[in-house]
Amino acid sequence: MWVDYHIHTTHSVDGYASPSVMCRQAIAVGLREVAITDHLDSNPSDEGAGRFDPERYFRDLDPLRTELADHLSLCVGVEVGEPHEYPSIVEGLGAWPFDVIIGSVHYVGHRGVHASLFDDLPLDRALSAYFDLALQIASCRRVDVLGHLDYFQRYTCRRNMPPFDPCRWEGPIRAVLEAAIKNDVALEVNTSGVRQAPGVCFPGQTILTWYHQMGGRAVTIGSDAHYVEHVGANLSDAVRLLTEVGFNSLCVFKGRRRSTLPLPRVDH
């Protein structure tokens, strides 16, 4: 069964299509289950800070879930930036029936990974701080999935910085993976990097191999779609990669309880 566990809509400040449009596109491209995971970013530097409204969110998504039930399983999720830094906000999500919570690094202090981080700090210092935050997210026990572990490559590539070599950061990355395994946090394979620089999934084969060797088996796949044409994009790349590494299942969630599905088959 094809699933996409990372989709944004107009409930995110950077989303460009309604939940209805995104879900109908999911059906059109053959998906059977999706998680809408709009942004909850609380860093004061983010233009979406304070914008996420769970009441409005569920009021929009619940009827859609019922309407499309014969064609699509719709999970209601949220992507939280730096959840360990805003514990009261994250704990408040417990009042709502979310299916899945993704935790991601979006800001290092006041510097957005997508904005000024790699302009303001030397590359090694920026990455050291980034992986430290990823470790804290994987350790905080407030999320179900660790999002796009090395997606910063989008922004280092745009600046013509050296290609990211995970082997240079093996120690910090393994610490993140170990924390995720220990705290039962799944690892997302995010396909947004396939359709833009650097042309790879986040994370790629090296990190996924380490994770598998360490005993990690809990993975999700997501397009990180913000535009309708990106719903389900490049999921087959993620499945091929996971199959090559040795994975045989994907995680899905209902009411924040995890179960697994067999990896879909793809032609090589």
Image: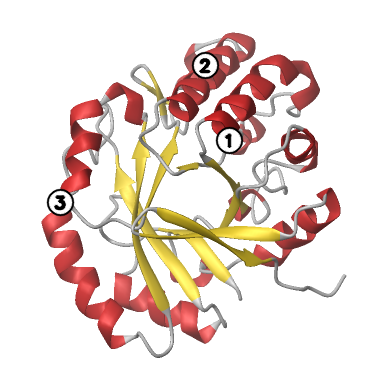
Q: Looking at numbered disc 1 in the image, what kind of residue is underneath it?
A: Leu
Q: Would you name the residue on which mark 2 appears?
A: 132
Judge by depth and name the residue closer to the eye, 51 or 76.
76
Would you say residue 44 is visible in this rendering?
no
Please name the residue that numbered disc 3 is placed on.
53
* Number of marks in the rendered image: 3
Percent across and percent down for residue 52 are 20, 48
Can you see residue 43? yes
Whether residue 88 sits left or right of residue 121 in the image: it is left
Horizontal side of 169 relative to 40 (left or right) equals right
Q: Residue at x 74, y 20 (%)?
A: 170
Q: Is residue 232 depicted above or below 88 in this figure?
A: below
Displayed quadrant of residue 17: bottom left
Which residue is drawn at the image coordinates 56% and 20% (left, top)?
Answer: 131
Task: Choose the circle earlier in sequence order: 2 or 3.
Answer: 3
What SS does tag 1 mark?
Answer: loop
Q: Amino acid at mark 2?
A: Asp
Q: Looking at the picture, does residue 257 appear above or below residue 108? A: below
Assign a secondary structure to mark 3.
loop
Q: Quadrant of the N terminus?
A: bottom right
Q: How far apart in space, not on screen, are marks 2 and 3 (Cα)? A: 29 Å
Q: Secondary structure at mark 2?
A: helix
Query: Do the CB atoms of the residues marked 1 and 2 lie less than 8 Å apart?
Result: no
Label 3 is placed on what type of residue?
Asp
Give the image location of residue 129, x and y in percent.
51, 14
Q: Tell me whether circle 3 and circle 1 mark residues in contact (CB < 8 Å).
A: no
Judged left or right of residue 100, residue 94 is left
- Mark 2 in CB contact with mark 3 (< 8 angstroms): no
Q: How is the image coloured?
A: secondary structure
Residue 190 position within the rendered picture, expressed as x and y whole percent measured from the top left: 59, 50
Check disc 1 and report the residue beneath it: 149
